Image (cartoon, rainbow, N blue to C red):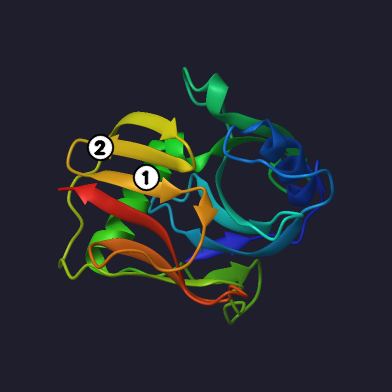
Amino acid sequence: MAIVYTATLVPSKPELIAAWLPLQPWYSEPSGGIELLGAFRFDDPYGEVGIETHLVRGPSGAVYQVPLTYRAGAMPDAGRYLVAELEHSVLGHRWVYDATADPVAVAQLAGAILTGGREAEVFVDGAEAPAEPDIRVRGTGTSARAPQATLVGVQTEGAITRVRTDSVAIDVRRIVDGLGGTGLRLDAVEGLPGGPATLAAVVSV
């Protein structure tokens, strides 16, 4: 379960994504605005790190995956993965990172893929019922429990970011374009205008 707050963010999420995306080597678009299609969250079991993945459409119509984490403090030796710093009117100063380099997010991604997990339920602070998710996701694995997954490396080639842990390697698709493969994957199953699509896939176990 993830708790979100009715709050003012400076910069806003659309603003920070719009500023960060054009700096990425896998983003090649004509000038123009981006459209946020929706987002989903995973849960940090310790409640310290916000884990949220945005799906964004560029001017060309391509759909990009932007996984982010929100932290109360800077991650050591992770400056090159910093997306932005922002002010949250409830939580205060936050550091926003590319989630592919955040060990908490990577562990939750691996767990969702390998156990058939889904997006976290999101409750607006004070609400008794969860909010309806923009994007629904599902892992294809059937393991009863996720293995240890400690992040050991991150490398981007083309539009794929490979995250390596001590137990599994996962390719995260920066450009989302339909379902791919029959192995262990995380798929967006509802909410994307083009239909279901693969977001990430295991490449070794």
Helix, strand or loop for disc 1:
helix
Q: Which residue is mark 2?
A: 165
Q: Is residue 160 left or right of residue 54?
A: left
Residue 93 shows in the view = no
Q: Position of residue 92 (x, y in %)?
A: 72, 39
Q: Residue at x 25, y 68 (%)?
A: 182
Amino acid type shown at disc 1: Val
Helix, strand or loop for disc 2:
strand
Residue 181 shows in the view = yes
How dense is the environment of label 1, judged by Cα within 10 Å: few (below 14), some, or many (20 and up)? many
Q: Are marks 1 and 2 in contact (CB under 8 Å)?
A: yes
- In terms of depth relative to the viewer, which is nearer, 58 or 79? 58
How dense is the environment of label 2, judged by Cα within 10 Å: few (below 14), some, or many (20 and up)? many
Q: Position of residue 77 (x, y in %)?
A: 47, 17
Q: Residue at x 55, y 22 (%)?
A: 80
Question: Which comes sooner in the sequence, label 1 or label 2?
Answer: 1
Tell me which corner region of the image, top left, top right, bottom left or bottom right, holds residue 88: top right
Whole-angstrom CA distance, mark 1 to mark 2, is 8 Å
Q: Residue at x 55, y 55 (%)?
A: 53
Q: Is residue 123 above or below residue 34?
A: below
Q: Is residue 81 above or below residue 193?
A: above
Q: Position of residue 104 (x, y in %)?
A: 39, 42
Q: Position of residue 94 (x, y in %)?
A: 66, 36
Amino acid type shown at disc 2: Thr
Q: Is residue 202 left or right of residue 134?
A: left
Q: Which residue is mark 1?
A: 106
